[in-house]
Image (tube, grey):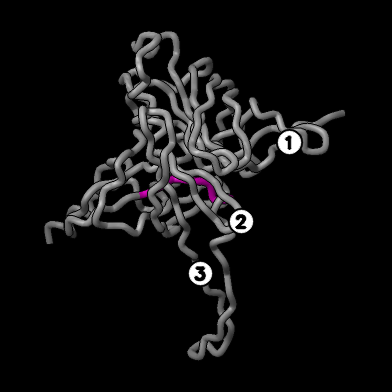
């Protein structure tokens, strides 16, 4: 009997609209909104002999007027750039484990005529947070003088009951190291991984290199909003991949990851906790 299994991929997903919230653009009109809100925030994450995808989810000035920019991706995309090494600690008189995180390179693509990729802009980014069980990681761009030109919108919390099964979704990522491209499908179901974390099942095809990209829907706010990060695909037999049965880390798990890592206030717009407000007044 053939058994479905989850296979890690490098993927990126783009999400579309439902019949209830259809894109009002008519046929023949350049899909500018789709490019600006889904394609342009997607970056290629370059990692030595391989590559994955990422999505810019924040780029704003801080109190010192430096730009802070963050890219969301998968843990398995950057895991080889996080290493534990044993070093001698003279104070404790024993070897201790020290974590080393190597910076990664990201490429932002530039386009002509909202479609033709004409080159890339390179940036260096550091791994500032990761969650192995949720297969998520957060990168901070080293460039603090320039704002990232395009930022994805995150599906907001407590604004509606969505996203919904049967809603059109888009998966966007730099598959096989190519310029980012979208595929379209449906939000098809829900599941859980071996750690008990939630997953979205979508029928938008994904391929190797798309991991760390984004899954989008066209929301009731008439915007394309990120609802997931493609992480795995289903397979059967000896690794026969089913590209249209793709599993993404859902927005609920993304929020947990960002809050646990201390980025809920900055990226999600959470209210600061009382203790933080008191310290600010002092």
Circle 1 packing at 10 Å, graded few (<14), some (14-19), many (20+), is some
Classify the position of the C terminus by image quarter: bottom left
Say left or right for 244 vs 15.
right
Up-down: is 279 above or below 205?
below
Q: Are marks 2 and 1 in contact (CB under 8 Å)?
A: no
Classify the position of the N terminus by image quarter: top right
Q: Nearer the viewer, mark 2 or mark 1?
A: 2
- Circle on res. 100: 3
Q: Is residue 117 magenta?
A: no
| Residue farthest along the right direction in this orientation | 1
Residue 255 in view (yes/no):
no
Up-down: is 48 above or below 69?
below
The percent coordinates of residue 224 (x first, y second) are 37, 25
Q: Are marks 1 and 3 in contact (CB under 8 Å)?
A: no
The percent coordinates of residue 98 (x first, y second) are 52, 74
Q: Earlier in the sequence, mark 1 or mark 3?
A: 1
The percent coordinates of residue 182 (x first, y second) are 50, 28
Q: Nearer the viewer, mark 2 or mark 3?
A: 2
Residue sitting at x 34%, y 11%:
24
The residue carrying mark 1 is 5
Q: Earlier in the sequence, mark 2 or mark 3?
A: 2
Image quarter of residue 203: top right
Alpha carbon of mark 2 to alpha carbon of mark 3: how far?
20 Å
The residue carrying mark 2 is 49
Please state which of residues 157 and 128 is positioned toward the viewer in this rendering: 128
- Circle on res. 150: none
The magenta stretch is 70-76
């Amino acid at each position: 009997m053939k058994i479905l299994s989850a296979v890690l991929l490098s993927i990126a997903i783009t999400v579309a609209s439902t019949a209830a919230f259809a894109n009002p653009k008519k046929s023949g009109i350049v899909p500018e909104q789709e490019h600006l809100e889904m394609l342009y925030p997607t970056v290629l994450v370059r990692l030595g002999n391989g590559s994955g995808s990422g999505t810019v989810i924040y780029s704003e000035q801080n109190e010192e007027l430096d730009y802070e920019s963050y890219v969301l991706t998968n843990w398995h995309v950057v895991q080889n750039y996080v290493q534990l090494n044993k070093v001698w600690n003279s104070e404790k008189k024993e070897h201790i484990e020290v974590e080393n995180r190597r910076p990664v390179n990201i490429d932002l693509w530039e386009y002509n005529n909202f479609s033709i990729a004409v080159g890339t802009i390179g940036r260096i980014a550091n791994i500032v947070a990761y969650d192995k069980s949720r297969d998520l990681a957060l990168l901070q761009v080293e460039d603090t003088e320039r704002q990232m030109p395009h930022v994805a919108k995150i599906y907001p919390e407590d604004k509606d009951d969505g996203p919904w099964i049967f809603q059109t979704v888009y998966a966007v990522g730099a598959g096989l190291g190519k310029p980012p491209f979208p595929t379209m499908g449906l939000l098809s179901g829900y599941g859980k991984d071996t750690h008990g974390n939630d997953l979205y099942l979508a029928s938008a095809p994904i391929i190797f290199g798309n991991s760390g990209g984004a899954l989008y829907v066209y929301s009731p706010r008439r915007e394309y909003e990120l609802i997931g990060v493609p992480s795995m695909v289903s397979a059967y037999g000896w690794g026969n991949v089913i590209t249209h049965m793709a599993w993404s880390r859902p927005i609920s798990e993304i929020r947990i990851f960002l809050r646990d890592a201390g980025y809920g206030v900055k990226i999600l717009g959470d209210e600061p906790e009382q203790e933080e407000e008191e310290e600010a007044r002092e």
